[in-house]
Amino acid sequence: SQQGEEDPQALSIQEGENATMNCSYKTSINNLQWYRQNSGRGLVHLILIRSNEREKHSGRLRVTLDTSKKSSSLLITASRAADTASYFCATVTYGGATNKLIFGTGTLLAVQP
Amino acid sequence: DTAVSQTPKYLVTQMGNDKSIKCEQNLGHDTMYWYKQDSKKFLKIMFSYNNKELIINETVPNRFSPKSPDKAHLNLHINSLELGDSAVYFCASQGGVTEAFFGQGTRLTVV
């Protein structure tokens, strides 16, 4: 089952520009995470934001979370060609001994040199 | 040392065959997952194992069976392979509700 949607599905920008990706989800969450996937590779964790946090920064990454709207955004500033990849949000729900890590549909980012 | 390793990386097999994909994690995590990524890049959760007990089975056909001999391993066995099973399968492990670590994926092609 898919937790939510991401938009845009694809994004093409020039090096140096900022890239913004949005994620919506459906249920209450413990935290929301963003992952990156280079073509043909596994997923790599980028950043985690807890349900009681509204904004978090890590290097050139800025994540916001609005639990009232069940949405999050990932901003990559001063993009580089090496940022070209697919980006996925994932929600973590936790109940007792149960973990669920459910992914959104992903955004394919292409950064043109 | 690779945190999460899965083998094989590529698997080409004929319809009707039975195959297994192995996954091992050396992180001491309690939770392991199997995901299927289709041609549209959607990542669908298939199974979650927490302390060797199956927690989730997301409407996956019973031809797929996870097997966990111990906390560090979660193997995926597939019976009677079908063309629609062709995809990339990812194993992942997670400690509590923190970040998950993924294997490099197994590209399964059923011909």
Image (spheres, rainbow, N blue to C red):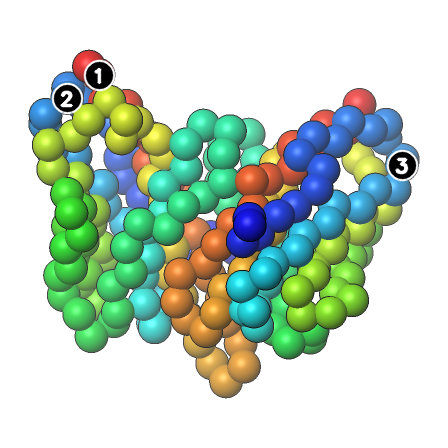
**Helix or strand or loop: what does disc 1 sit on?**
strand
Residue B20 rendering spot, x and y as whole percentages: 80, 46
| Residue A112's disc number | 1
Residue B102 lies left or right of residue A68; in this view the side is: right
Asked whether A92 or A47 is in front, the reply is A47
Q: Are marks 1 and 2 in contact (CB under 8 Å)?
A: yes
**x then y, percent, for residue A61:** 17, 46
Vertical side of B103 occupied by B13: above or below: above
- The outermost residue toward the bottom is A96
Alpha carbons under labels 1 and 2: distance apart: 6 Å
- Residue at point 70%, 59% (across, down): B74
Per the image, the residue denoted by label 3 is: B17
Distance, label 3 to label 2, CA atoms, is 47 Å
Q: Specify the subunit that label 2 lies on.
A: A
Q: Secondary structure at mark 3?
A: loop
The kind of residue tagged 2 is Glu
**What mark, if any, has residue A15 been given in the picture?**
2
